[in-house]
Image (cartoon, rainbow, N blue to C red):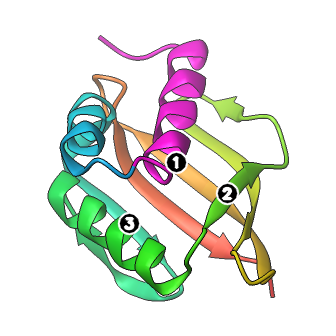
């Protein structure tokens, strides 16, 4: 079934929480529900992207290791247009570094995230 706008908003919120989930098995369980098996994540640091739930989980682990105390806060509501959505966020680290960006999501026919393109603000 095609996901509804509220389903997409819920998937985005659940995706947001995987960035703070320290238990890998719990993170992978959530990703298995919201992330397509061949879902792609791209950002300026990973322009070639990572594919699949395990690769995304590994990327999250590496990011948390690179930025100790990483906290990501949504700075906008999730906007949905058909099978796409976006929201803005701010990240901060334990040492006070902050950066912001926008996540653009595309969903598959089952309402799982098929592609996420993450832009960092200049």
Mark 2 secondary-structure assignment: strand
Mark 1 secondary-structure assignment: strand
Mark 2–mark 1 Cα distance, whole angstroms, equals 17 Å
Mark 2–mark 3 Cα distance, whole angstroms, equals 12 Å
Residue 96 percent coordinates (x, y): 81, 80
The relative height of residue 109 versus residue 99 in the rendered view (above or below) is above
The residue identified by callout 1 is 105
The span shown in magenta is 1-21
Mark 3, other Cα within 10 Å: few <14 / some 14–19 / many ≥20: some
The relative height of residue 14 versus residue 18 in the rendered view (above or below) is above
Given contact means CB atoms under 8 Å apart, are the residues at marks 2 and 1 in contact? no
Query: Looking at the rendered structure, which numbered label has been put on residue 72?
Result: 2
Near-viewer residue (42 or 95): 95
Q: Of the residues under marks 3 and 1, which one precedes in the sequence?
A: 3
The N terminus lies in which quarter of the figure? Answer: top left
**Residue 75 magenta-highlighted:** no
Mark 2, other Cα within 10 Å: few <14 / some 14–19 / many ≥20: some
The image quarter containing residue 56 is bottom left
Near-viewer residue (55 or 81): 55
Mark 3 secondary-structure assignment: helix
Query: Looking at the rendered structure, which numbered label has been put on residue 60?
Result: 3
The C terminus lies in which quarter of the figure? Answer: bottom right
């Amino acid at each position: 079934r095609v996901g509804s706008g509220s389903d997409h908003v819920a998937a985005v919120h659940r995706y947001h929480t995987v960035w703070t989930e320290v238990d890998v098995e719990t993170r992978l369980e959530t990703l298995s529900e919201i992330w397509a098996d061949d879902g792609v994540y791209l950002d300026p640091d990973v322009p070639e992207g990572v594919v699949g739930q395990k690769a995304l989980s590994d990327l999250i682990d590496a990011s948390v290791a690179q930025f100790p105390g990483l906290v990501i806060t949504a700075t906008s509501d999730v906007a949905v247009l058909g099978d796409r959505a976006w929201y803005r966020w701010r990240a901060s680290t334990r040492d006070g570094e902050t950066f912001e960006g926008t996540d653009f999501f595309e969903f598959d026919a089952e309402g799982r995230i098929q592609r996420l393109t993450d832009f960092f603000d200049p």
